[in-house]
Image (cartoon, rainbow, N blue to C red):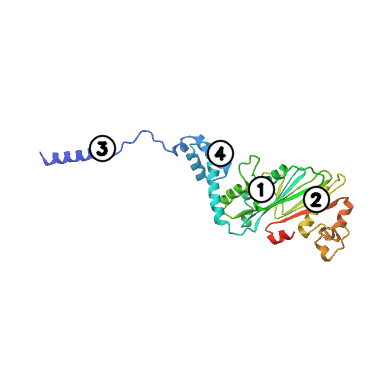
Amino acid sequence: MSLLRSLRLFLDARTAGSLRLQSPQPRHTFHAASWLSASSSSKELLMKLRQKTGYSFVNCKKALETCGGDLKKAEIWLHKQAQKEGWSKATKLSGRKTKEGLIGLLQEGNTTVLVEVNCETDFVSRNLKFQQLVQQVALGTMLHCRSLKDQLSTYSKGFLNSSELSGLPAGPDRERSLKDQLALAIGKLGENMTLKRAAWVKVPSGFYVGSYVHGAMHSPSLHNLVLGKYGALVICETPEQKANLEDLGRRLGQHVVGMAPLSVGSLDDEPGGEAETKMLSQPYLLDPSITLGQYVQPHGVSVVDFVRFECGELEEAIEAE
């Protein structure tokens, strides 16, 4: 056999062997992520999930892959993952101080609630997701107040501390608590946060609740929720429905925020000395030449109680009040 022919036979045999070693490629391949690029409807699902949950493209894509493109299951999976991550972050960040945040004031019918939610920085307090958390806390407090069975002959007032607030349901379905919503927010925003406190007031006919929030801004999705750094509720008794009660209530709330009284006092209190902490004997904030009592008296209403929240207020000051 010639040398040329031997060499050709050797090369043919080597080529055939290498072809046998290669795995044949199937005509059609499919894996967990292939559905995402398969159709425009898959991309629409991805966009819907992002808009509904607010989570990142990567997380939404992973959720849809894990759940085989089922939108509802993907949403549930995302919330569970976020909650796990949120609890982990909440544990890691729990020692950090939370002196910033927002006061939320919500009024519906004869019920008014005031809540405080804290975070680490003012930057986060301006974030929409943080404001949505304050909204959830206000709504949760409102639902709690509405669930209380009471026959009102006079006004009623109550307070919730941090642990009581955390245990409230976040909505009428009662599936999640406000503590769960807090963990989700911490997971998304990466700062320590606390549900600090809440107050609620319910009034029957013959009473009126004036309110004021300093630096007020309205919630983007709940028109009757007002957000700010200071908030006040002033409970007035009025024998008959009067005009301009809303304006009067706002001015009384401004006074409470600005002058920080410790008690209502009475119209008989003399100005000065210890009476400076009593609301009715204090110089009226908008006209210091008269007392607040002298301002209120001609309007034919009686101030009977108030609540004042200052964001980031020290626990000692709260206990003193």
Mark 2: give few (<14), some (14-19) or many (20+) Cα within 10 Å. Answer: many
Vertical side of 307 occupied by 153: above or below: above
Does residue 131 appear to the left or right of 67 in the view shown? right
State which tag comes first along the sequence, 2 or 1: 1
Residue at 55 percent across and 40 percent down: it is 76
- Name the residue beneath numbered marker 1: 137
- Name the residue beneath numbered marker 2: 235
**Rendering quarter of residue 174:** top right
Residue at 12 percent across and 42 percent down: it is 3
- Name the residue beneath numbered marker 3: 20
Circles 2 and 1: CB atoms closer than 8 Å? no
Residue at the extreme top of the image, as rendered: 27
Mark 1: give few (<14), some (14-19) or many (20+) Cα within 10 Å. Answer: many
Foreground mark, 1 or 3, reads 1
Alpha carbons under labels 2 and 3: distance apart? 89 Å
Quadrant in which the N terminus is drawn? top left
State which tag comes first along the sequence, 2 or 3: 3
State which tag comes first along the sequence, 1 or 3: 3
